[in-house]
Amino acid sequence: MELRDFWGKSSKSWLFLILLFIASFGFYSNVFNWIPRWRQREVSQSCEAHHLQGQRESPPLSEGDCYPDTCRVPRVPRRVDVLLMTPWFAPIIWDGTYDSAILDAQFRNTTIGLTVFAIKKYVVFLKLFLETAEKYFMVGHRVIYYILTDRPADVPQIPLQEGRRVVILKVRNYTRWQDVSLHRMEMISNFSQQRFLHEVDYLVSADVDMKFSDHVGVEILSSLFGTLHPGFYASDRQRFTYERRPLSQAYIPEDEGDFYYAGGFFGGSVAEVYRLTTACHQAMVVDKANGIEAVWHEESHLNKYLLYHKPTKVLSPEYVWDERMLRKPPYLRRLRYVAVPKNHAQIRSR
Ligand SMILES: CC(=O)N[C@H]1[C@@H](OP(=O)(O)OP(=O)(O)OC[C@H]2O[C@@H](n3ccc(=O)[nH]c3=O)[C@H](O)[C@@H]2O)O[C@H](CO)[C@H](O)[C@@H]1O
Ligand SMILES: [Mn+2]
């Protein structure tokens, strides 16, 4: 059969060839589409690797390494076993809820002031506090340790990483340990105005009889943050040890209260910490004039303040824990800042 006959007679074959052409065109155009997709998948796999490293607190990756939408958004970690948000939409910070790589980049040019009081015998806690802070607290960021003490000569010298320094602020002492603890608010308030406002972006106030035992980084930073007290994070509000006597400025009625916050770890922007510490100090002055001292001292006033000035972030008990007093529930994956055992009677005596 001649070729002309084939084209002429077999219109079916004609049709078949046209269809074959269309089908193969479709196939190859898809193949060409796949090539960039393969490349993209390679990039996003390398992003995942970076991302996982990020969760292990690696240095931040550069923005140019990843496509923002494939790298960042779909990989947001989730927890379903703990409360992640307050009713006023403040995040509650638990392990597995944030990405250090993203946050470290966001807070790249931030200076953090860590205020810690070491009055009288409490200077003995400074060495371990500072050594463990160097290992775990705001690593890779600028830090000023403000050590408020009546015994500057007893402040230990420890080697510091680059971008970190110690500032010793001499303060008076008080005979009663309760007064030492209470007057922390007044002293932070005064120094905020005098220097913290000009020297740092955020302030963190911490107890000294503690040590850092895992990462505490910029994920805690926000305008105003408090920490869930490890003894009460699972309790009903009726069991919170708020001040219940109406005579005190720290009074909270039985049917009010969100959380019970720990006195030993709170902070925020310097402006907010200044407002908080000034308000708590003024409330204590009024209490003193009325001959009353709140049941848990400045912690009671802190709780009152944070009830009516809602914190913008809340830290889980990972950020204040006591291994001797409490049994760790399975959902508490990390212990970041923990109590150092102390003999209360001995350490609090003059
Ligand atoms: C982890 C935590 O949430 N701790 C709180 C808790 O008790 P604590 O039993 O942890 O109180 P504490 O003895 O640690 O005193 C609080 C802090 O005041 C300083 N200090 C105290 C006495 C002294 O002689 N020298 C000295 O430097 C020191 O920084 C110490 O860490 O309740 C206190 C109020 O009752 C405070 O609210 C603490 O922040
Ligand atoms: Mn303490």
Image (tube, grey):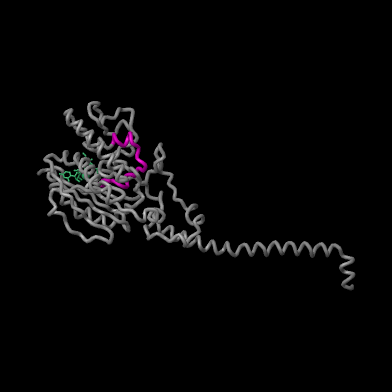
Q: Is residue 251 visible?
A: yes
Give the residue at the far top of this rendering: 246
Q: Residue at x 64, y 64 (%)?
A: 31
Q: Is residue 309 left or right of residue 75?
A: left
- Toward the viewer: 283 or 38? 283
Identify whether 17 is placed above or below 200. Answer: below
Residue 292 x, y percent position in the rendering: 18, 30
What is the quadrant of the N terminus in the image? bottom right
Identify whether 186 is placed above or below 135. Answer: above
Identify whether 183 is placed above or below 73. Answer: above
- Toward the viewer: 160 or 7? 160
Q: Is residue 342 left or right of residue 230?
A: left
Q: Is residue 191 left or right of residue 44?
A: left
Q: Residue at x 33, y 42 (%)?
A: 224
What is the quadrant of the C terminus in the image? top left
Residue 28 x, y percent position in the rendering: 67, 65
* First to last magenta residue range: 303-323
* Ligand 2 quarter of the rendering: top left
* 153 within the magenta span: no
Residue 82 x, y percent position in the rendering: 40, 43
Identify whether 47 is placed above or below 188. Answer: below
